[in-house]
Image (cartoon, grey):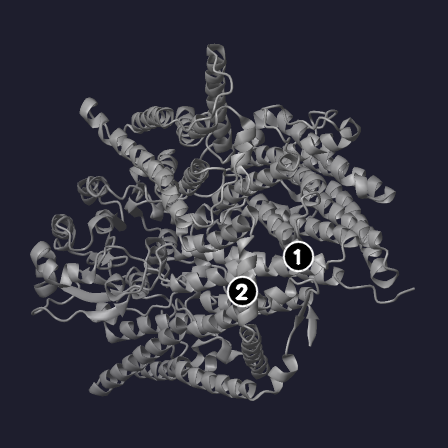
Amino acid sequence: MWDQEIKGMASAHVILASTILLATVMPTIFLQNFSVYQTHLAWLYSVAGLVAAVNIALFWLLGVGPAAKRNSFGHKVSRLIRCCLYFCLSCLFFHAVVLLYGAPLLQSVLETFSLAVLLSTFTTLRCLCLLGPNIQAWIRVFSRDGAMSVWDTSLQITTACSIIGAWLGAFPIPLDWDRPWQVWPIPCTLGTTLGFLSGLVIAPAWIHWHRQHLTYKSK
Amino acid sequence: MKVRSSVFASLCLIVEICGIALFLRGFFPAPVKSSFTLKSKLSDQPAEPGPGDAGNSSKVPPALFNRVVVLLIDALREDFVYGAKGRHFMPYTRSLIERGSSLSFVAKARPPTVTMPRIKALTTGSIPGFIDVVMNLNSAAMLEDNLIWQARAAGKRLVFFGDDTWLRLFPKHFELFDGTTSFFVSDYTEVDNNVTRHLDAVLEWHDWDVLILHYLGLDHIGHLSGPHSSLVGPKLIEMDNVLKKIHTSLISKETEGTLPNLLVLCGDHGMSETGSHGGSSEPEVNTPLVLLSPAFGRKAGLEKAEPVEQVDLAPTLALGLGLPIPQNNVGRLLQPVFQSTPLRQQLRYLQLNAVQLSRLLKDSSPHFHKEEGHELFRVAEKSHANWVKLYLEGNASEVLLNVGKKVLKQYLDALKAMNAALSRQLGKYDMYSMVLGMVLILQVLLLLLLAMPEALSSGAEVELPLGPALLSLPFFLLCLLAAAMHVLVCTSAGELCFPCNLHWGATIILFTAASAGLCLLLSLAARRLAPMGRPAAKSAGNSGCFSELDVLLLSGTVGHTLSLAASSFIEEEHQTWYFLLNTLCLAVFQDVCRKYFREKRPPADDGALLAPRDKPAHSSSSNRKWLALTTPLMTLTFCRLLRSLNQTGVQWAHLPDLGHWLTSSEHKGALSLLAAGSLVLVFILVHRRCSLVSKIALVLGLLGVYSYRAAVGNVLFPWQQDGRDLSKGVLEARFVYVFVLGILFTGAKDLLRSQVAVADGGLKSRGLWEVYAGLVLLAALVSRPHNLPVLSGCLLIQVAMTRFIWRDLQYDAAQVTIMHVWFGQAFFYFQGNSNNIGTVDISAGFIGLETYVEAPACLLTAFSTYTGPLLWAIHLAWYLTSQQDSRAAPSLGHGCFCLALLRSTPAAAYIIMVTALRYHLFIWSVFSPKLLYESAHTLVITVVCLFFTAMDRKPTIQL
């Protein structure tokens, strides 16, 4: 059962990773002059949109999402609205954090906000899909030894990797190489994406490696 | 021998300071400078030796050339003219060199092979050292005696086209000029067309004496694609055409009755095989120097170009134009240029050059009469006098000619020896001192690292096996070895090394210290390694439970140290610190959240709000919780605001910031309000722990600060009358100084009492707070008015962090120290400092002084520069002392040790990196200033550590 769960997660991760590649390659067919550096925002939103769609579809199909207690239509709608609200809030939160890190306040607001959207897609959206709009569950998952399933661990790892990737991505900005990819926010978005990709790779590997030590206590 | 960790840390830092001083002495050799501050004048020139009645002998001999054109091609390598490339691409020049009336040399440039120092070398004849370059960063214009100034003073008319570095170095020297900027490296055609387009007009026009052309295109091509690129050929052809144009229109046309003209073709530096320059490899150093004039005899064929120094051009041109030689010149004239003149005149030229060099030698070396060159010069001058006597007697025989030739040779030998003596002191790294300094610094770092587990233990004492180490055989062997090595190095390298010129006592102390350090290191390492088995497993278990914060603190420290290897990260070091500080605040925020949320997690996760429900009695504790939660967020916001106050660094320094907005005269009202508000906030935050007397002193002092700023004209007084003229505010500033000293005195009194008398813990921390308050007042006085928010923000963050974070989350002394150090660094940059010498606020040194007095001015400038790190360090002392009462742990010792370790790690790493990168292109523009900053910072931290050590003492007398 363990192996099966890990395999399921790994294949989900492979699908997600190929989505990112697809989102990078596909727009060249539809759009002229598309490139990751020049039309960065287009690339960013294509990645964010596709990853979001695939994420939602995957979790819905696999059925690993939160077990709903009441299954009424009204409840579902309210959950959906809360999810959207949380997503927007998380975008604003990331935007604020990036501003605190020294992004220009008014200049290139759109770029900064797009970075926040990308970060939210890679982190918050997955949390929402997996845990629902339930802050308590989030706190549980992100506190020490709080993971209760393979998916929780994968969530922890991909989230941490995305954020660390964005963090590390800021390092090349001050270098005086004058390269096209050093323009704000390209290094950070690329860092986030690479971090997320490596998180997708690391998570199954790590769980597989530690499967003897991992004991998930049930609720 | 057991030593407390604070004592150990201070000792280590003192040794480190000695090591850094030794390293700096080797890295920045003392420049050779004439002691005369004035420029040389024609009337000061020495008379021709010989009998006193010799007619017009005290005059400088007449000029040899009428007009001079200097064609300077940036990065012109020697083989571009003399090699195969020259034959292909510069045919006209080659034909002149081989068969025309020309003289060709290979001029050796000295590192740093960068344009600006090279222009200085060409015009002054001196070799600018790195320290010159660093010291002159503020004054762009050249103040030294130079050829351009001399030519201008002699009434020559100068014209310049090319690199605008010249215009910055010599403002208002040129009658006609057009500067091109070397900023756009990718442009290699336009820069040169901008020079060439003036050429026709200037060659038609006859109202000039000296024309200087500086072509940048070749250098840009080198940077773009290297010396073997296909772009080099066309560029050389272009340059050959320029030379042809000048030569045909000016040089080859001989006009009767005037002196001949001269065309000089030279390069400022070469280029390496990759196309860059700055270092000291052969292709970077060797440049061609071709002199073309009908005055020179025609050549029969290609001769091997003679190697000379680049600086030799300066005296040659000076004498050729009939000007005095620039004072700091170390070059010797190119004798072939003067070959065609009568022998008497030739000797006169040589004598002028020799006298100038001997004067410089006299100024630069105390043992000048021991120098061989000086001796040779004396002899040559004497025989010159005899020759002149013979000459004036009308003795025109073969004997006279032979004697004259002998004198000439004597002069040339003297010049060569003096030049060698002078250049030995210049432009070279004294590797021996550097290595000795590095050995000391590395020893200190390793000692600190090895002693870390002991020093940070609960005992806070380090067991130093000093006695056994000093009596052991290896110690004596090491001493002997060091002495032998010293003798070997000094006998082979001669006078060049600084340690060889040290007093023998100092040398013995140095080597004993170094060997003792090594022995200590070995014994400590042996002790660490001996019980390898057990602690290894234990430490592995320990490292497993590092919290995220510990990981961040460690990786941040290591990462910052590593980032110093890149010049961009040094230029933008503030970004590193802001980034780390932000991450630190977020990590602290996470810790706070964990403390307040996780423990009280409601058993059922029904999505209810997290406010503590069943605790109405503890409303104050819930308040406290929210305050604790907002503290890191407030810190983050403040840091973001403060960083937009001063843009520093290089890449984004030009962006508008709040500081500029505030200091512009239209916003004086806003600045006044902000300054007043900040001062009030400072008072509110500091006064709580002060005694009554200090409170009053603080109020008056802060009022004094405001009235000082109003008097200087930075801020507005509400009741200020308009017509009041500005003063220097000396009275107001001194008024503040009185209160600063008063508060410091009361603090010191408390501290002394706590040292001698009962262990009343409160007394010591009260005293420390008063010292802190005094320093805050001083900081308020010396910081620029728009930087007052930095001060109040610093205090606010300190107070909030102390009350809600550091105590409640029970961070240990080491963690708190590292956080203080990070904050201190960030505040250093918030103040507007950078790693460039230009941002030091020198005006702080004049506050309250009528005239410039060196000692207080230096102290005040240092204090105003390092306000951030100093205030945070003193706050750390107070915090750790006030903690010490509640807990038994000797946190002050731990803090002191961590400070020392955190300072010596980057300092030692940086010194090694600088040594490795000493031929880097940016060595004098980026790395050298940073080296000075690192050294000054280490000095400041040493003083702080000594203060910590003094505080760390237990009271001696128990009543």
Mark 1 = which residue?
Answer: B895
**Which label sits on residue B537?**
2
Q: Nearer the viewer, residue B92 or B453?
A: B453
Q: Position of residue B157 (x, y in %)?
A: 31, 48
Q: Chain of mark 1?
A: B
Residue with the most extreme right position: B959
Q: Is residue B320 above or below residue B167?
A: below
**Residue at position x 49%, y 52% in the image:** B555
Q: CA distance from mark 1 to mark 2?
A: 27 Å
| Element on which disc 2 rests | helix
Q: Residue at x 40, y 48 (%)?
A: B568
Residue B930 in the figure: left or right of residue B451: left
The quadrant of the rendering that contains the N terminus of chain B is bottom right
Packing grade of label 1 (10 A; few <14, some 14-19, many >=20) is many
The amino acid sitting under disc 2 is Ala
Who's the residue at 46% across and 11% down the image?
A73
| Of callouts 1 and 2, the N-terminal one | 2
Chain containing mark 2: B
Q: Nearer the viewer, mark 1 or mark 2?
A: 2
Look at the image and tell me whether residue B841 can be seen.
no
Residue B588, by quadrant, is top right
